[in-house]
Amino acid sequence: MELNLQELKQTEFPVPVELEDNIAITSLSQLYNWGRRNSLWPMLFGLACCAIEMIATASSRFDFSRFGFEVMRATPRQADLMIVSGTVTKKMVVPIVRLYNQMPEPKYVLAMGACASGGGPFKEGYNVVSGMDKYLPVDVYVPGCPPTPQALLYGMIALQRKIDGQSIANGDDVPWYGVGPAEPTPVPVLGPDIIDPRQMDMIRRQAESAAMEMAALGQRELPAATQMVAAKATTQEAVAAAPAEVDSDALNFVLPTGGTPWSEAEDIREKRRLRALARKAVRATRRAAETDEG
Amino acid sequence: MVEALATEETIDAQTIDGAIAYLQTQFPDAVKLDDREGYQGLIVDSAQLLKVARAIRDDLGFDYLSSATAVDYLGVDDHMEMVYHAYRTSGGGALVFKAQTDREDAQIPSLVPVWRGADFQEREAWDLYGIRFPGHPNLKRILMWEGFHGHPMRKDWREAYYEEEVKPFDSRWPGGHVHRSEEKNVFGKNVAYPPEIDLNRLMDSSETSVYSSLGLGVDIEQIMDKDGFETNQLVVNMGPHHPSTHGVFRMVLTVDGETVTSLEPVMGYLHRNHEKIGERNTYLHNIPFTDRLDYISSMGNNHGYVLAVEQLMSLGRRYNPPTYRCEALRVMMVELSRIVNHLWAIGFWLNDIGAFFTPVLYFIQERERILDFFEAVAGSRMMCNYMRFGGLFADLPERIKSVSNLANDRVRDYNTMQFLTEMVNERIPRTIDELEQLLTQNEIVLERSIGVGILSAEDAINYSAAGPLLRGSGVAYDIRRADPYSIYPELDFDIAVEQEGDMYARYRVRVQELRESVRILRQILPRLEATKGESIWADGKVGAYAPRVPLGEAYGRVENGKGELGYYIVSAGGKNGSSNPWRYHVRAPSFINLTPMGIMSTGYKVADIVGILGSIDIVLGETDR
Ligand code: SF4
């Protein structure tokens, strides 16, 4: 949120009259977020058609500098925000993940347009990644093909609001203050098709079972709609029964054999996420209770 | 008829029919007429292709190979085919010739020794169709990466999210079931691996292997080997993430000091399988996809595609050509797109030679106003999806809303014709004047661009360069005049040409073309006034939305902002026409214009490379498709 100077001066702490105009009191978190949210520098990084609208957003008519996005930096080392502006292809996702790893924390990803959010019009293409979130954590999705500059601005402001909600007091909100360097996202490898290192075990297992049938891995018969729902329900039950063993990605499809062990980093991240969610829920109920009383 | 033309003297080889007859008499056992229904041109015996191609270029004067592409006829006659479209730079129609080969172990001699412009196109055919070209200097994959499994455009190759051969898919229509494709994939992603995948031998990512697969013409091992003998040569990688490459384009250069000794464009980072998807789509589906090719000038892309399909539809019985008003509107939209395109191209070229982001702001501002107009007419700023087979999406609205003053974004309500008149007669000319005043004699622009990135006229033709790149080299070839379409023959305008072939010449060509476009627009406006009230549809949209397209092939081409944009479309399969294209190929100017990038850059400094690329004016959506 924007800092309102008038409000900051109204405090219950005693402030000498002569200093009233010079002292403002706020929480460290607020001050810190105010600085961060107003100096988010995007990376100068265009992928496809959406990049043209991103450039339009940066230029005089729409001008995102007005909201603190100031300048685009061509190097990831100076950027806070990666706007994934266009179709992510398998060939391109490798450098994208590498660029993401090179960005200093805190860093955010905005998926601009249908392509970056979920594959878009080209989703079925053999070289197209079904959305940036298959490889990187995405903070804001902006729908559209391409989103208008106004929509992109709205998305960027949504990101600012997200930052407002983060608190230094909560280590899960600001993991970059944690001890030690953050785990880099594993960079995908271009083999016969793109390979996500996190799925290596699964691919190996599939290859072993497929070696007998000599059928391509990956494709499967599409079950009829009803079966699909049923199958999904079973998977979810299985997940609920043995949560530690099952890849959470598996929620989306039926695993032919058991679960996949995640790398440790994934595990930690997942636990953190769950804890953060739980805390958020507690906060929300508390807030609701407060407003009820008030 | 063939007998009548049997002697050489009676053959008028200037006409296309004459040229075909000439080839038939010269090479009676190597060529035969392509007599499949709806097809044209010749089928050349693969073994003698080079010989015939030389005769086509040297004896008949077809010096410009516009397009070379492959078609897989699996299930139709079970062979593969390369289709070539050759033109004369003096104007006229295409000489179409084809070479056929087996699907297994497909091989066709390379035509690079005859037309260098075949280079990237043959690499593409190898990459996507698995046709080998003996004699090609550097037959590597170009859009996909080395090591990818299979050749994806072959009709029997299926993508990971494969559902059915053609749309509409049963799962979606008419039942209306929706699913996420991820759900049917074991890995939850758009991937499929061959069963023999060997995870222990994944791509080696060492520098040597990264560069040595590119065919740079230098010994990478030696350059990389720091202990080897001393040398100043370096390999420099630019892109795919680089502020100057106009998208996700990559160049690998070897430099000696500051001087470039070789350059290899690397692409495919935005290869989004336009053609594979296009062959699954219905004809109508493809119109919005063409918008996303050259996303700066979507109207021009629409135009080329509808022209190609209309060509095919005109073979059938139920077809009415577009009305006059429709043609006038199409030309107006296309010329406005050309203005947008050139303003953008000049602006970003200036970025590249050091005027970072200041001049381009002025041009983008003018562009915004044109986009407001597109939005009012077609409903979208960039992806207009405006043209239809035999018509248009909509006529001009009575009034449009646009910002009156970009500084404060105040929206005003205009009468459309008044808005257009003001834009064409005042605003755009004013912007061009301002542009010229600031740049044409600007000392830095002159210093940086004169004599840099030279492409000679012969090379430009031989490398199949198109658009301002070709005309900047002194070749007065503009499809609007050389092979006219729509209502261009009756419009009064000149072809912009400059002789020098350097960056500055290309800039001058673009500025002149801006002025010519304004001139055309001034002639269009009275035509729109005169046809007011006339329908944009001839005879009520017959077949416009779900056409059954008669069998045959068609090549529709237009002069787009970046050069010759062509669509090669084959309708095959059914008995009485098809509802999905069998082959849908885009001859993309941005892609083929990069073929001479290597020779244009060698000998110049690293800092010039960026400008040279900017002066070619590429857009990646079209380069990689
Ligand atoms: S969302 Fe649409 S406009 Fe954006 S990159 Fe994808 S196809 Fe292009």
Image: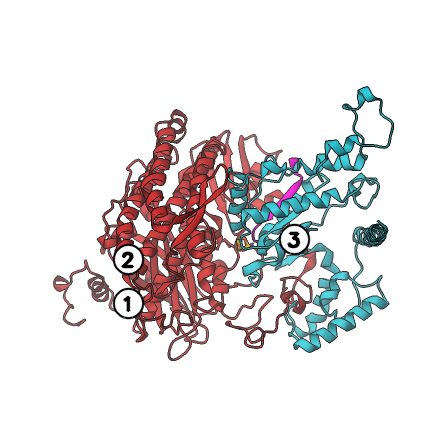
Chain colours: A cyan, B red
Position of B441 relative to B582 (above/below): above
> In the image, what residue occupies the spot 79% across and 43% down?
A175
The answer, for residue B609, to whether it is visible in the render is no
Residue B231 lies left or right of residue A131; in this view the side is: left
The answer, for residue A216, to whether it is visible in the render is yes
Which residue bears the numbered disc 2?
B485
The CA distance from mark 1 to mark 3 is 47 Å
Is residue A293 covered in magenta? no
Which residue bears the numbered disc 3?
A189
The CA distance from mark 1 to mark 2 is 30 Å
Judge if badges 3 and 2 mark residues of a common chain. Answer: no
Q: Chain of mark 3?
A: A
Closest to the observer, A18 or A77:
A18
Is residue A84 covered in magenta? yes
Which residue bears the numbered disc 1?
B31
Q: Amino acid at mark 1?
A: Val
> Which residues lie in the magenta part?
A78-87
Q: Horizontal and vertical percent for residue A142?
A: 61, 52
Tell which circle, 1 or 2, labels the residue nearer the N-terminal end: 1
> In the image, what residue occupies the spot 39% across and 36% down?
B453
Closest to the observer, B539 or A260:
B539
Q: Amino acid at mark 3?
A: Val
- Mark 3 vs 2: CB contact within 8 A: no
Task: For label 2, count other residues whose C-alpha is less than 10 Å away and answer few (under 14), some (14-19) or many (20+).
Answer: some
Q: Secondary structure at mark 1?
A: strand
Q: Horizontal and vertical percent for residue B419?
A: 37, 46
Q: Secondary structure at mark 2?
A: loop
In the image, which is nearer the foreground, mark 3 or mark 2? Answer: 2
Residue A50 lies left or right of residue A253; in this view the side is: left
Q: Chain of mark 2?
A: B
Q: Chain of mark 1?
A: B
* Quadrant into which the N terminus of chain B falls: bottom left
